[in-house]
Image (spheres, rainbow, N blue to C red):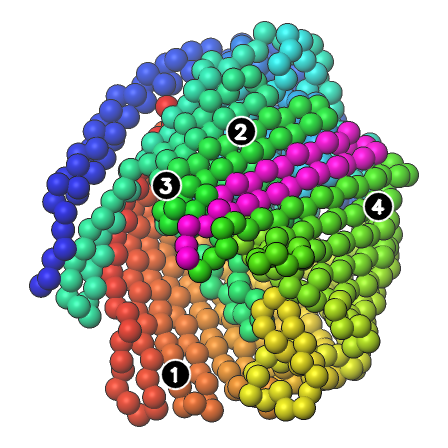
């Protein structure tokens, strides 16, 4: 056996892990003694502090019967001391009707069954809010929501919660240290708060205050709590180190290798509303697994960001402005963020292991009622011979709101630099939208110059394109009927080439969505059907040896010719109620792929054994018959996922994913499978331990030949982190 070891490095990492674990065992008692001296977080609501808390009991339905009083009683209590927020309550329902599962933090299952949510706007600017979620078995979620209530669960905070389930209600207690959030730098403050409760048995969603049925979660409409005073951050500096150790056995080479690294973050709050965040050697979330996605388009697949250094400012980089997954292994990074009533600033710089320097910046000015102006930029200073010295993109966009924000006028302009003194390429987007609870209408256009490609610090996109779109939609409501909500929507889209006008075509897409309530035992089912009639369309074909006498055009990817195709396109999707014991989602699409017939299926299903165990299976399949412009192609992805959530802090997850690719024209077969076993333990607030095993096997073969393995690897990962 060939063994590649650095014994001293492994021994150092192992010793540090043991020291951190042992030291944290003794720290647990001290942390709870210091931070929980005023109230014991046990879910029982027996402490004196709750008697003087501000109470909220009269919740109002959003679904199914908007503005109606909630059919089930909920009690929320809000209070604070100098260093913490405390939120607790009683949520009334029969014990037998509770639908809830233990889950890892931010797992989507938490918001698909019974839960409560708390939104907090401590800056009282209506721009965004912090979001905290708890279900009856104390599964947690946290994140941020934008000005109209769209959630983003990538932001993480340190907080403590507990729940208790009784016969006729369940209780919860939540403690949020003020060090976890930004707030105003004032002696006396006004905060916005929102309390939400979802009762899965009746599919009822309700909140404590509803001012506008069109945007019920608008942050500026949160209930205002006045006269908050005497609060402070108990500490201005937080340090989060982590230790990471990795071992890999390559069966093909019979070799064993080890590696490890140490990194972390330092967060400094010079004021309650500003943050300076430094990172060193940050983890790329190796303990997470990106889900495989079938992609037959011209553009590469992009995945969401998971590194805390970047997710700290996710709300500042919306849409397609900046793609931080382009930034791979990082040596160090520094971020400054400040949030005011009308002004938000984020400045970020990164130095990666290839000696590239990246810069990201955002300046946002808005009152969240009438106007919104934003400048987003990114720059990369490359240290390689084959790239120009630097690449940048700058985007400016603004919004004006009218008629209580139901009408929105929107504009976006982006530009990137080009080498050798060429003129900069650009993108322009303009829109006029009307969005209410019943009507959705608008016109929209997008112009992208011939070589516009923001892929260095943005997302990959087709260039040399014009899109003009209009749409009209209407939604019917029947709160007590079988079809609770029915939406119709029709789109007209015109496509052309920006640098080569006169090659246009029109696409019509018609959609109907239904929400069916099939009773308490089955719940809500969502069904969506899309249909596009047989209208001539065009696609870009890039195989240059087959251009023949066709007219050749250019975009940021390559030269191409336009090929006409026409067909009826049908898409069908249905989703069952995820709060039930079993459920599924199915999707079918028959859109042509470069003039070739294609069928694309996907299925995801789950079974909840009990509150601790859930088994899920997903299946993705695409079958392309082939044409003069597209090879035959068949791919199958299976994904089996089993979770055993021992409690709300200790979770185990197993993933088995076999993939299969067949290209009959080449008599080629490729198969691989991934096996992943993850153990995660939040051993104390702000402290996490991960143990991950991965197995990867990949081989390709020609028909009738023996298996030819490309990869056959086993790896083991250990990671521990703690915030001090």
Q: Residue furthest right?
A: 403
- Counting residues from the start of the chain, the first of labels 3 and 2 encountered is 3
Q: Quadrant of residue 552 in the image?
A: bottom right
Residue neighbourhood size for the residue with mark 2, other residues' Cα within 10 Å, grouped as few (<14), some (14–19), many (≥20): some
- Horizontal and vertical percent position of residue 435: 83, 48
For numbered disc 3, what is the local secondary structure? strand
**What residue is shown at x 56% (from left), y 29% (from top)?**
337
- Counting residues from the start of the chain, the first of labels 3 and 4 encountered is 3
Relative horizontal placement of residue 234, taking residue 201 as reference (left or right): left
For numbered disc 4, what is the local secondary structure? strand
Of labels 1 and 3, the one closer to you: 3
Distance in Å between CA atoms under marks 3 and 2: 18 Å
Instruction: Read off the residue under disc 1.
Output: 669
Instruction: Read off the residue under disc 3.
Output: 331
The quarter in which the C terminus is drawn is top left
Distance in Å between CA atoms under marks 2 and 1: 50 Å
Distance in Å between CA atoms under marks 4 and 1: 51 Å
Distance in Å between CA atoms under marks 1 and 3: 39 Å
For numbered disc 1, what is the local secondary structure? strand
């Amino acid at each position: 056996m060939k063994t590649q070891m650095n014994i001293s490095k492994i021994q150092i990492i192992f010793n540090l892990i043991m020291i951190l674990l042992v030291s944290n065992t003794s720290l647990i008692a001290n942390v709870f003694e210091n931070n929980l001296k005023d109230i014991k977080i046990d879910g029982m609501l027996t402490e004196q502090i709750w008697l003087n808390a501000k109470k909220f009991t009269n919740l109002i339905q959003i679904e199914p019967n908007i503005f109606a009083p909630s059919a089930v009683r909920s009690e929320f209590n809000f209070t604070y001391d100098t260093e913490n927020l405390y939120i607790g309550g009683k949520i009334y329902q029969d014990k037998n009707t509770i639908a809830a599962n233990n889950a890892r933090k931010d797992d989507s299952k938490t918001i698909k069954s019974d839960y409560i949510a708390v939104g907090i706007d401590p800056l009282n600017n209506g721009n965004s809010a912090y979001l905290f979620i708890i279900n009856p078995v104390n599964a947690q979620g946290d994140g941020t929501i934008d000005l109209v209530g769209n959630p983003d669960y990538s932001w993480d905070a340190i907080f403590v919660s507990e729940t208790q389930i009784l016969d006729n209600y369940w209780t919860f207690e939540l403690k949020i240290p003020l060090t976890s959030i930004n707030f105003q730098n004032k002696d006396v403050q006004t905060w916005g708060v929102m309390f939400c409760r979802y009762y899965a048995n009746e599919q009822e969603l309700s909140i404590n205050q509803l001012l506008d049925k069109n945007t019920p979660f608008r942050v500026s409409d949160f209930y205002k709590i006045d006269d908050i005073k005497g609060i402070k951050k108990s500490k201005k500096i937080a340090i989060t180190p982590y230790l990471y150790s990795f071992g890999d056995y390559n069966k093909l080479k019979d070799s064993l290798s080890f590696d490890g690294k140490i990194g972390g973050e330092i967060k400094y709050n010079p004021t309650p509303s500003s943050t300076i965040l430094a990172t060193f050697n940050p983890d790329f979330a190796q303990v997470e697994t990106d889900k495989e996605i079938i992609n037959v388009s011209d553009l590469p697949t992009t995945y969401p960001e998971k590194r805390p250094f970047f997710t700290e400012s996710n709300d500042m980089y919306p849409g397609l402005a900046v793609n931080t997954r382009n930034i791979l292994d990082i040596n160090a990074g520094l971020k400054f963020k400040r949030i005011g009533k009308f002004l938000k600033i984020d400045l970020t710089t990164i130095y990666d292991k290839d000696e590239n320097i990246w810069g990201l910046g955002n300046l946002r000015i808005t009152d969240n009622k009438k106007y919104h102006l934003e400048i987003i930029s990114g720059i990369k200073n490359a240290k390689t011979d084959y790239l120009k010295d630097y690449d940048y993109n700058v985007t400016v966009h603004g919004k004006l709101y009218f008629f209580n924000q139901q009408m929105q006028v929107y504009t976006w302009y982006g530009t990137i630099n080009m080498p050798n003194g060429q003129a900069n390429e650009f993108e322009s987007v303009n829109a006029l939208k009307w969005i209410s609870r019943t009507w959705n209408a608008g016109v929209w256009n997008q112009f992208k110059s011939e070589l516009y490609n923001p892929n260095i610090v943005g997302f990959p996109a087709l260039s040399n394109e014009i899109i003009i779109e209009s749409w009209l939609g209407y939604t019917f409501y029947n709160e007590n009927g079988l079809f609770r909500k029915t939406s119709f929507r029709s789109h007209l889209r015109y496509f052309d080439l920006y640098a080569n006008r006169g090659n246009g075509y029109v696409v019509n897409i018609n959609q109907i969505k239904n929400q069916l309530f099939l009773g308490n035992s089955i719940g809500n089912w969502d069904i969506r059907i899309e249909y596009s009639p047989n209208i001539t369309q065009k696609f870009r074909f890039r195989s240059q040896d087959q251009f023949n006498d066709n007219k050749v055009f250019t975009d940021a990817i390559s030269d191409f010719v336009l090929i006409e195709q026409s067909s009826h396109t049908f898409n069908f999707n249905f989703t069952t109620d995820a709060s039930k014991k079993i459920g599924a989602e199915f999707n079918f699409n028959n859109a042509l792929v470069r003039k070739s017939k294609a069928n694309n299926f996907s299925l995801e299903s789950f079974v909840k054994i009990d509150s601790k165990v859930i088994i899920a299976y997903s299946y993705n399949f695409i079958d392309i018959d082939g044409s003069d412009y597209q090879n035959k192609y068949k791919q199958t992805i299976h994904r089996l996922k089993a979770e055993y959530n021992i409690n709300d802090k200790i979770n185990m997850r197993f993933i088995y994913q076999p993939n299969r690719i067949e290209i009959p024209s080449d008599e080629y077969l490729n198969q691989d499978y991934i096996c992943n076993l993850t153990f995660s333990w939040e051993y104390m607030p702000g402290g996490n331990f991960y143990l991950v095993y991965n197995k990867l096997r990949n081989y390709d073969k020609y028909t009738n030949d023996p298996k030819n393995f490309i990869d056959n690897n086993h790896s083991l990962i250990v990671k521990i982190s703690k915030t001090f």
